[in-house]
Amino acid sequence: MKKILFAASECVPFVKTGGLADVVGSLPKSMDPKKYDIRVIIPLYHAIPEKYRDRMETVYYFQMDNRIYVGVKKLVMDGITYYFIDNEQYFSGLVPYYDMFQDLERFAYFSKAVLSALPLIGFRPDIIHCHDWQSALIPVYLNTVFQGDPFFRGIKTIFTIHNIRFQGTWNVGHLKWVSALPSECFKPGLLVSPFQNTDYPENEWNASMMRGGLVYSDYITTVSNSYAQEIQTPQFSDGLDDILKWRNNRLWGIINGLDYSIWNPSTDGKIAQNYNLVTLKKGKEANKMAMQRRLGLKEDGKVFTIGLISRLTDQKGLDLIDQCMDQICSMNINLVILGTGDRRYEDMFRYYATKYPGKVSANICYSDELSHLMYAGCDALLVPSAFEPCGLTQLIALKYGTIPIVHEVGGLKDSVKPYNQFEQTGTGFTFHDYSGWALQDRINHANWVYYDKPSYWKEMQKRGMKEDWSWTNSSKIYADLYEK
Ligand code: ADP
């Protein structure tokens, strides 16, 4: 049996700010428990609900480097063992992330604490599978500071990029201080870009924790095939294309899957009425009206309703939506938004909700419950992201018979098949050029098919619902990788 440890900064059901938590929560459960003992380690944030904290037991506590406290707690749930790194100083805030400056220190501590704890908690993994920059220093520590310790000999590492935009970047001076890594790690080509302008003093060079993860891990994965190609180009790599091209024989693109025990319209306990391929029309109408009631919109099971469920940041293509809003709102349409993020986008949607009352509902909050009801109650879902490593919302939408309208990029391109009216194929509306015009054109098309060709619409919904975006396929590819 192979032993694998997932190290990450978030995990469903304990703490979630985005898709990373869904993946870390669901992938271990999808792997064959007879072949893999997969455990997960995350920080013990205060934000983790008490109902979980109360059930945790303390496994061990110690002073790391003789100066800083590390507690390790444990909770076994649904057959998976979860560990939590406890330190009040670092993780007592109400949210998992603060600002980058503070987070660098918090997650450098987390990465080192994970390795320091392993010999003490009775679990020696064969593979440590690290997710995103917050755990990117684990392969670096393993191959430097911990290298001489026989306990760690032979442990392999995998680093998964969920989003290359966030890398844990700061100047060398600060990263050296927070990580206490040896100076050699900060040579150009390691944590520092080989194209660094060396006219500056060394301590002012930019260093990236994620670059460290990419250099020192045995294998690299990312969350779709297209994104694996895209991040090897300067346009999408945020400065890491050199290392990704250099290591591309070790880079795998594996699309994320969904946990269908959570995301399934026929069993979902958070929606107004369950439905399946047969009861699709009635079910979606009932959910649409329940959603309209809840949001104070006029109850009308027939009105074309578009949803947006997203972090409100530049990545998500909200500038395109801004360009189309007046046009969209001139149609017989409802637009329901659920998201939080940058102030300017939050205010933008608040403004449109005031400008078009009864048409636009702006819910500037995080609500898991409302998101379920929206997947069930909306007819279409917008995902116009400028870049999208995988994207989960379009996969969930497909399962709920909600037609995705997406930009052909990254995982969106790999998961939504363009609608072809003549052949009656495809599962969503897709556009190639990143422009408001292209998005508007697809929304117009969707609007027309919805109202004028309802039987085509229904067939497209069914094609999407029949697809399998669970972990069944992707977990086999992860198994191949673990065997390697
Ligand atoms: P990202 O990881 O970039 O945020 P993904 O599409 O991979 O985007 O995953 C987003 C996940 O977060 C989905 O499960 C989506 O339903 C959920 N989500 C995003 N915003 C909200 C919100 N405001 N309320 C509830 N769930 C949300």
Image (cartoon, rainbow, N blue to C red):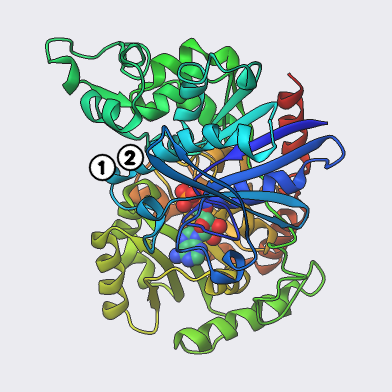
Q: Are marks 2 and 1 in contact (CB under 8 Å)?
A: yes
What residue do we see at 61% from left, 59% from top? Answer: 397
In the rendered image, which quarter is residue 285 located in?
A: bottom right
Which quadrant of the figure has residue 209? Answer: top left
Q: Amino acid at mark 1?
A: Phe
**Three-letter code, disc 2:** Glu
421 left or right of 141?
Answer: right
Which residue in the protein does label 1 denote?
Answer: 101
Crowd rating for badge 2 (residues with CA inside 10 Å; few <14, some 14–19, many 20+): some
Q: CA distance from mark 2 to mark 1?
A: 7 Å
Vertical order, 276 against 170 (above or below): below
Q: Quadrant of the C terminus?
A: top right
Image location of residue 117, percent across then percent down: 56, 37
Look at 40% across and 48% down and name the residue there: 438
Residue furthest right in the image: 34
Classify the position of the N terminus by image quarter: top right
Q: Is residue 141 left or right of residue 351?
A: right
Which of pointers 2 and 1 indicates the residue nearer the eye?
Answer: 2
Which residue position is annotated with label 2?
105
